[in-house]
Image (spheres, rainbow, N blue to C red):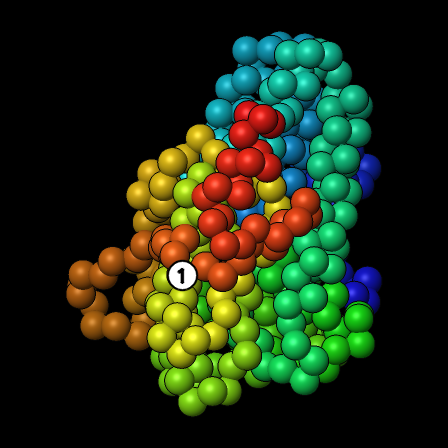
């Protein structure tokens, strides 16, 4: 990956992040100096994607510790504000709980917490590279791969999960073409996936969400790789709305459906996908595109932001500790239950 942008980084005691709301039109970095600003940035999707919001929240806890100045009750209240920013991606809660554990064990020293948040960021990139190299083995040379939403460098601290698999395949010398679902309502595929793959010189073609099933049926897709916001203990995968339709179409067309996600996305405390809270976002994401109203005024809309793909439709899950396949629920339990 060319180091042409950074999703988020710590500089001069502040958290800097690329404003993803205005990509691909403008590349602008925002500098945040309070935990509340970080919570708002997560809520309004300045930063988005499960691992990236976990990393942002960890640095949010650092800013909260700087603001609290030894007042633990104030610090914990800021952690709660960060945790309320978005409900579905478990990485947010994983990161905040991890930072709380560190505070409990070692105190609320801001420079120690900053080092811990930086470690989470560095480990996220390392995890993406590792799962990328495992996943790349499953991507045939000279193939067409399809992805949904943006599970790329922009959704992580760098490299990406699903797009990390594609980057690793390209780095291994494979020739691939990526089909990026546009991903209504917010168009993360059309805007963000296209932007970051273009920047890296990876062959990307955007399709409307409606085209995916038909292209698979016509034999024009060799594999699907998506990211995830939360994987339940039984292997059900929660991801951006529309992922389930892609998985159903992939099953019908006999196309392998892969999920790439770090272990911090697997929630062994969540028995099934039905237990995952699904965020409902504001109607304006559906009624408007780029601030322009496209639907009749006053028409009711629904806007669930995520859906659940049952484990039975998942061919394999790529993580930094290996590949889970066949009986995914059993494999997850064997690998992860001792870590609970
Ligand atoms: O609403 P978003 O843009 O935060 O949703 C992002 C996704 O659904 C991604 O696919 C998921 O977080 C995996 S990111 C590596």
In the rendered structure, the answer to whether residue 61 lies left or right of residue 287 reads: right
Q: Quadrant of residue 36?
A: top right
Q: Please, is residue 49 above or below residue 339 in the view? A: below
Identify the residue at image location x=53%, y=54%: 325
Which residue is found at the position 17% from the left and 65% from the top?
A: 299
Q: In percent of the image, x 78 and y 22: which residue is there?
A: 112
Q: Classify residue 326 as left or right of residue 111.
A: left
State whether residue 277 appears in this view: no
Q: Quadrant of the C terminus?
A: top right
- When asked about the image quadrant of residue 79, the answer is top right
Rendered location of residue 121, percent (x, y): 73, 41
Question: Residue 74 location, x and y as percent?
Answer: 56, 15
Extreme residue toward the left, this view = 299
Q: How many marks?
A: 1
Q: In the picture provided, is 129 more to the left or to the right than 292?
A: right
In the image: residue 216, left or right of residue 112: left
In the rendered view, tell whether residue 144 sits above or below residue 33: below
Label 1 lies in ligand 1 vicinity (Cβ under 8 Å): no
* Quadrant (top left, top right, bottom left, bottom right) of the N terminus: bottom right
Q: Position of residue 69 (x, y in %)?
A: 69, 14
Q: Single out the residue that lies furthest toward the bottom.
A: 218
| Percent x, y of residue 164 | 68, 61
Q: Secondary structure at mark 1?
A: helix
Badge 1: few (under 14), some or many (20 or more) residues near its Cα, within 10 Å?
many
Q: Nearer the viewer, residue 278 or 324?
A: 324
Q: Residue at x 54, y 30 (%)?
A: 337
Residue 108 visible somewhere in the drawing: yes
Residue receiving disc 1:
313
């Amino acid at each position: 990956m060319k180091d042409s942008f950074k999703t988020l980084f710590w500089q001069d005691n502040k958290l800097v992040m690329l404003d993803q709301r205005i990509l691909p039109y403008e590349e602008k970095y925002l500098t945040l100096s309070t935990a509340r600003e970080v919570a708002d940035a997560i809520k309004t999707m300045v930063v988005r994607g499960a691992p990236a919001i976990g990393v942002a929240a960890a640095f949010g806890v650092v800013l909260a510790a700087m603001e609290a100045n030894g007042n633990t009750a104030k610090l914990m209240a800021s952690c709660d504000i960060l945790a309320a920013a978005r409900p579905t991606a478990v990485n947010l809660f994983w990161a905040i709980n991890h930072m709380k554990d560190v505070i409990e064990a070692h105190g609320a020293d801001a420079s120690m917490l900053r080092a811990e948040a930086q470690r989470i960021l560095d480990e996220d990139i390392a995890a993406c590279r590792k799962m990328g190299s495992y996943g790349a083995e499953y991507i045939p040379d000279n193939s067409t791969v399809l992805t949904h939403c943006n599970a790329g460098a922009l959704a992580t601290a760098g490299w990406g999960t699903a797009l990390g698999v594609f980057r690793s395949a390209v780095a291994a010398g494979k020739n691939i073409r990526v089909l990026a679902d546009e991903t209504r309502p917010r168009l993360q595929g059309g805007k963000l996936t296209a932007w970051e793959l273009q920047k890296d010189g990876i062959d990307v073609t955007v399709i409307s969400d409606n085209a995916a099933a038909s292209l698979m049926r016509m034999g024009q897709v060799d594999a699907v790789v998506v990211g995830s916001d939360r994987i339940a203990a039984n292997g059900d995968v929660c991801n951006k709305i529309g992922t389930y339709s892609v998985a159903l179409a992939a099953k019908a067309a006999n196309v392998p459906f892969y999920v790439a996600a770090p272990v911090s996305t697997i929630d062994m405390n969540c028995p099934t996908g039905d237990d995952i809270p699904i965020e409902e976002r504001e109607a304006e994401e559906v009624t408007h595109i780029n601030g322009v109203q496209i639907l009749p005024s006053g028409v009711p809309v629904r806007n669930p932001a995520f859906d659940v793909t049952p484990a039975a439709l998942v061919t394999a899950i790529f993580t930094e500790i290996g590949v889970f396949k066949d009986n995914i629920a059993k494999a997850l339990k064997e690998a992860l239950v001792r870590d609970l």
